[in-house]
Amino acid sequence: MDTYKVKDIKLAKQGELLIDWATDHMPVLGLIRRRFMEEKPLKGVTLGAVLHCTKETGVLVRTLEAGGAKVAIAGSNPLSTQDAVVAALATKGTPVYAWREQTKDEYYWCIDQLLEFKPQMTMDDGCDLVSRLHEKAPKLLAGVKGGSEETTTGVIRLRAMEKDGALKYPMVAVNDTPTKRLFDNRYGTGQSTIDGILRASSVMIAGKTFVVCGYGWCSRGIAMRAKGMGANVIVTEVDPTRALEAVMDGYRVMPLLEAAPMGDIFVTSTGNINVIDGRHIEMMKDGAMLANSGHFNVEINIPALEALSEGKRRMRPDLDEYRLRDGRKIYLLGEGRLVNLAAAEGHPSEVMDLSFADQALVAEWLWKGPKLAVRVHDVPRDIDAMVARLKLESMGVGVERLTEQQLKYMGSWREGTV
């Protein structure tokens, strides 16, 4: 079996520069890596990973390898791989199967290569490796001690597997821990989504009506950044509590059918299917732009858009113009895939420092810890707190400490009104 398949191995030198740049902006993972080099807590484990193959992921892979793990990796999106980064990983001996602009068949072929390594742990972004293991290689499941999931969509799939009784080994929802969800999802997705829209289209954000579909942590970040750039933000939601929160945050909230004729830019980030459907597209104004920041390219109903269209042109590298039968033009960014990775470089290294620190420490906990029940677990609170503390220290920020009196008071029920 070939130990790698990438687009161009000659890009390795450029990839090393990108990984070095990310390393300089990921101090928490750097601290973990130095400890891993000394202690080798992952010695003996074969870890299969399906992640966005970016420069930040390169730093994570090198950290896991420093801890003694054998890591085999494939990309978690056909358009998110940075070809120079995977070339650099392959040159240093990491089994890697990823390149940008894969077909669907190539994408799953790459994931299937990881099964040949008989992974004892998994690290997923979207749950495709976990589902592939369960469907195509059930005999390998007994040898898997556990795994972790990076994204909201993947956790949704895992909880569905657990509910159906289909899940056969314990998983940890890294996505749901505060140092991932509150920062990566909100600040990372917010900044990188705007970055992707600007790189793909170069349009002015200020003054535009910007429709954000959903108001989870990712959507909160997108709405916040769009508002900060001068957009008039509309939020659509199905959850009444989140809708109320969006109203309290100062946004207009309405059903998407009402927002469709008003919007200039639409962004989905929900984890669901056909959020923007044909009936919405039929009501949109000429020149409306559609982008997705949810994990899979199903949030915008692209077949419906194509069915309504009589022509298509690629106007820019990540922007396609669809000409509807009535003459209106609708623009789709990044082929409906994650716009922040398809048209930009994904989240900034500084925020991925938190998420990938969580991933590295969870991998250590899973491998060295006791056997867990087969279900979806939360990240241990002490791991989350440690990552937050290390990040603050790297930023030169101090925090208060409770006094002995305060600790005693917080642990007592006897003291009340005096």
Image (tube, rainbow, N blue to C red):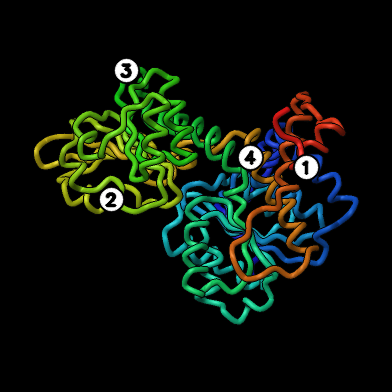
In this rendering, does residue 78 appear at all? yes
Disc 4: CA contacts within 10 A as few (<14), some (14-19) or many (>=20) = many
Q: Is residue 220 left or right of residue 407?
A: left
Q: Earlier in the sequence, mark 2 or mark 3?
A: 3
Asked if residue 29 can be seen in this view, the reply is no
Instruction: Indicate which label's residue lies in the foreground, 1 or 2.
Output: 1
Quadrant housing residue 370: bottom right
Q: Secondary structure at mark 4?
A: helix
Spatial CA distance of label 3 from label 4 is 31 Å
Task: Using a 10 Å C-alpha cutoff, classify the residue at mark 2 as few (fewer than 14 neighbours), some (14 to 19) or many (20 or more).
Answer: some
**Residue 374 percent across, percent down from the top left:** 62, 71
Q: Quadrant of residue 94?
A: bottom right
* Secondary structure of residue under mark 3: loop
Say which residue label 2 marks: 301
Provide the residue designation for mark 4: 352
Q: Secondary structure at mark 1?
A: loop
Q: Which mark is residue 411?
A: 1
Separation of residues labelled 2 and 3 (CA atoms): 27 Å
Residue tagged by mark 3? Answer: 207
Residue 281: x and y, percent? 20, 42
> Residue flagged by tag 2: what amino acid is it?
Asn
